[in-house]
Image (spheres, rainbow, N blue to C red):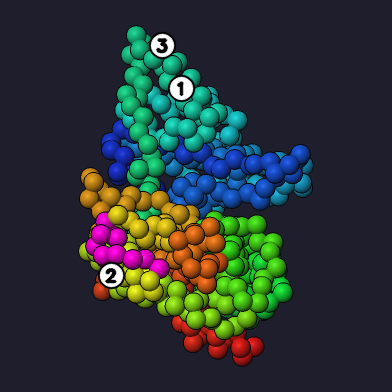
Amino acid sequence: MIKLEEYKARRKSLMQKMGSFAIAIIPSAKLLLRNADTEFPYRQHSDFYYLTGFEEPGAVLVLLKTHQSEKFILFNREKNPSEEVWTGFRAGQAGAVESFNADESFPIASFEEKLLELLIGPEKIYYTVGSNRALDATISKSLSKLRGRIRSGIDSPLEILDVGKLTSEMRLFKSNDEISLMKKAAEISAAAHIKAMQVCKPGVFEYDLEAEIMYHCQKQGARFQAYTPIVGSGDNSCILHYNENNKKIADNSIVLIDAGCEYNYYASDITRTFPANGKFSAEQKAIYDLVLKAQLAAIELAKPNTPWVKMQEAIVEVITQGLLDLKILQGNLKELIDSKAYQDFYMHNSGHWLGLDVHDVGSYKIKDNWRKLEPSMALTIEPGIYISKTNKNVAEKWHGIGVRIEDDVVITDNGCDILSAKAPKTINEIEELMNNK
């Protein structure tokens, strides 16, 4: 778990980045209707949670920085026993102070009135415009009122800056406690992938494997997936974001599962590919070996001072050479890479940042230069090859083979720690697991 002291340190770090006279305003996530009067399960906005640990809706976080003080103000729902019977416990204003270390807490209904006072003095507002239309309007209205009082000697903030640019850089570097939570999420998900491999056999449906994944994760305390699971067999394995998960799995098909749970708000993201009947065909094995070789080449580069793009370059070179060796591509290696001929088979990048969001925040370039990896960054490494039946330039024996292998890694001082290492990924490991149930 993340301790209250860490949330406090994060707020302090953000306020230091804001400057001397500034205010940050960050709203909680909104409740969303699923249909009629039924709501989707609530999940707090990642930045809001990162700075507070507060999980209730209907709240606004304010950080106020002056020369003399740094203040954490939380606007949140009041206690209401009759409503709490229906929708659950509320911290209220006393709870915000006692349990979440707020310096002050006010009812959310008073936010617009209080905002006028809070905007007198700060030179800058850190707020992500467009993230909440109602709050956009409230801030705009308050600024207009203050500007109308300029002849009274009242100054309003001079500029609005995106607070997300500051929090994104902070969130890119994970603390030890964050890494522990991500490792737990990855281990739960790795075990779920193992369960799916063990129960898979020709004739079951894709949703049977999805159910196995979700059941195991929930039983281990990870109630929610970090994203909708992808369980694609045969031709569906070649659809990158396939999630209908409703096809009966054929005997000779390949099965691609991209699934990872969220544990205490932190995401995992693992992809494994395996044969439905427990034995890779010659063609499946050839493609799988190639993707694994590409991934291992990228993992070798996952260490401090490696520019992000180098992992992608390594993957592209291995995959293109492999497709040449298999005679799926023809021509000169350099020319094929330069013309991006590989994109008919490998059309995405090497991976993405990972953390509170499965596609986590953080820039990949700094002033047009690819960012270099640093210790405590977390990312995925996920090469793939997808040979759809719609690709008429490839022999039919390759059709319906989609392979992706994805692991979660954290950069260390000398290399990387593979958080998802417990999910089998060599051909021997997979076949042995599936045939010794």
Disc 1 element? helix
The one nearer the camera, 162 or 251, is: 251
Give the residue type that dot 1 points to: Ser
Q: Kindly identify the residue that appears in the image at 39 percent across and 57 percent down.
A: 343
Disc 3 element? loop
| Residue pointed to by mark 1 | 140
Q: Kindly identify the residue that appears in the image at 59 percent across and 35 percent down.
A: 107
Disc 2 element? helix
Q: Are marks 1 and 3 in contact (CB under 8 Å)?
A: no
Q: Position of residue 341 (x, y in %)?
A: 35, 58
Q: Kindly identify the residue that appears in the image at 64 percent across and 41 percent down.
A: 32
- Residue 294 visible to an observer of this rendering: no
Q: Position of residue 143 (x, y in %)?
A: 42, 20
Q: Nearer the viewer, mark 1 or mark 3?
A: 1
- The crowd level at tag 2 (other Cα within 10 Å; few <14, some 14-19, many 20+) is some
| Residue pointed to by mark 3 | 148
Q: Kindly identify the residue that appears in the image at 34 percent across and 19 percent down.
A: 155
The one nearer the camera, 84 or 411, is: 411
The one nearer the camera, 18 or 336, is: 336
Q: Position of residue 238 (x, y in %)?
A: 53, 62
- C-alpha separation, residue under disc 1 versus residue under disc 3: 12 Å
- C-alpha separation, residue under disc 2 versus residue under disc 1: 47 Å
Which numbered tag is attached to residue 13?
Answer: none
| Residue pointed to by mark 2 | 301
As displayed, is residue 43 above or below residue 193?
A: above
Quick one: label 1 or label 3, which is nearer the N terminus?
1
What residue range appears in magenta? Answer: 328-338
Q: Position of residue 306 (x, y in %)?
A: 24, 64
As displayed, is residue 146 above or below residue 172?
A: above
